[in-house]
Amino acid sequence: MVRDVVRLATLADDLSGEVLTVPTDITAPQQVNTLIEKAIAEFGQIDILVNVADAGILKPYNSVEPSTR
């Protein structure tokens, strides 16, 4: 989760193209749903998803459940 919203907005302004910033806690399913809804509202659809977020879960990826934190 981005902890400095002002810095995030500044970085987004420096980028060319369309940028949507939505600080999101990926361990909170409702926040993730909100992120998806905002992205679709802004751009119409999601073509590519690049997940670079880290929740620090120390388990094999195929054994992680949505409720795992």
Image (tube, rainbow, N blue to C red):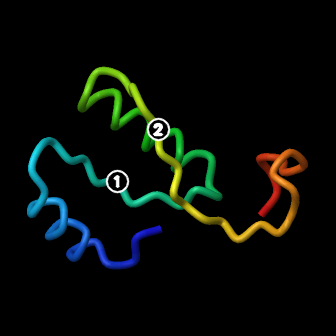
> Residue 19 location, x and y as percent?
20, 47
The image quarter containing residue 47 is top left
Check disc 2 and report its element: helix, strand or loop: loop
The image quarter containing residue 28 is bottom right
Check disc 1 and report its element: helix, strand or loop: loop
> Residue 59 location, x and y as percent?
87, 62
Q: Is residue 9 above or below residue 26?
A: below
Amino acid at dot 2: Leu
Residue depicted at 53% across the width and 46% down the height: 32
Residue depicted at 39% across the width and 27% down the height: 46
**Is 40 left, or right, of 7 in this rendering?**
right
Label 2, residues with CA under 10 Å away: few <14, some 14-19, many ≥20: few
In-front residue for pair 47/20: 47
Quarter holding the C terminus is bottom right
Amino acid at dot 1: Val
**Is 2 left, or right, of 9 in this rendering?**
right
Residue depicted at 40% across the width and 70% down the height: 2
Residue at the disc numbered 1: 22
Label 1, residues with CA under 10 Å away: few <14, some 14-19, many ≥20: some
Q: Is residue 60 above or below residue 56?
A: above
* Cα–Cα span, label 1 and label 2: 14 Å
Residue at the disc numbered 2: 49
Q: Is residue 20 above or below residue 44?
A: below
